[in-house]
Image (tube, rainbow, N blue to C red):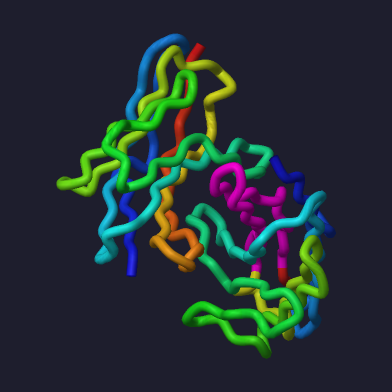
Amino acid sequence: SAVISQKPSRDICQRGTSLTIQCQVDSQVTMMFWYRQQPGQSLTLIATANQGSEATYESGFVIDKFPISRPNLTFSTLTVSNMSPEDSSIYLCSAARWAPQETQYFGPGTRLLVL
Amino acid sequence: AQTVTQSQPEMSVQEAETVTLSCTYDTSESDYYLFWYKQPPSRQMILVIRQEAYKQQNATENRFSVNFQKAAKSFSLKISDSQLGDAAMYFCASRGGGSNYKLTFGKGTLLTVNP
């Protein structure tokens, strides 16, 4: 299995500010993803973090609002920019490995509250 | 596009008994994968079981098994000999085949295990 850590685990932020969430995987993985889980809701994919290139965003999510970096195979960051209370959510990092069989692992999440 | 529907927002089971969680999905792809994930109150998502659509045999993992009905697009999870540690939110998820690795999640079923 892959162990995924995220920092910070939680934060309370003021509207208009930005927060960068870090995701570290303990071993090389093929793909990394960022999901949002709004209170009491399911997970929604924000984007696929591509190593050394721009992330691939899902419909409804844009780079200006959620810039993502992935400088190497085991590390990625997600920034939530110009936050509003609607951004209050849990943000989860996910990493996928294909051997010995396809598995996606999830980090513990970052609980964000925007005031 | 893929959609996943979990029609049971909450379920409960007595310890040591069996419970079945329902999931239906829709996809236009012939090659796809189905998953059940568990999210305990600690928030870390854990893969419970996976099923490749091309396999007719239902997947099993210890006390967890699935009933995969491809024609009906149904993918239910059976938990046998339920334990207190099984209490969690359970998410059904799917992904398409090929290089489309993103997961589509259902809304989840909250399972309570009563002692």
The picture quadrant where one finds residue A22 is: bottom right
Q: Which residues are magenta?
A: A88-113
Q: Percent x, y for residue B29? A: 28, 64
Answer yes or no: is residue A24 visible: yes
Image quadrant containing the C terminus of chain A? bottom right
Q: Percent x, y for residue B110? A: 45, 37
Q: Looking at the picture, does residue B66 appear above or below residue A59?
A: above
Front position in the image: A7 or A75? A75
Magenta stretch containing residue A99, yes or no? Answer: yes
Q: Residue at 59% x, 86% y: name it.
A: A62
Image quadrant containing the N terminus of chain A? top right
- Secondary structure mostly seen in magenta is strand
Query: Is A94 placed left or right of A6 in the picture?
Result: left
Q: Looking at the picture, does residue A94 appear above or below residue A17?
A: above
Q: Looking at the picture, does residue B109 appear above or below residue B81?
A: below
Front position in the image: A78 or A90? A78
Q: Percent x, y for residue A77? A: 78, 70
Front position in the image: B98 or B87? B98
Magenta stretch containing residue A51, yes or no? Answer: no
Answer yes or no: is residue B106 visible: no
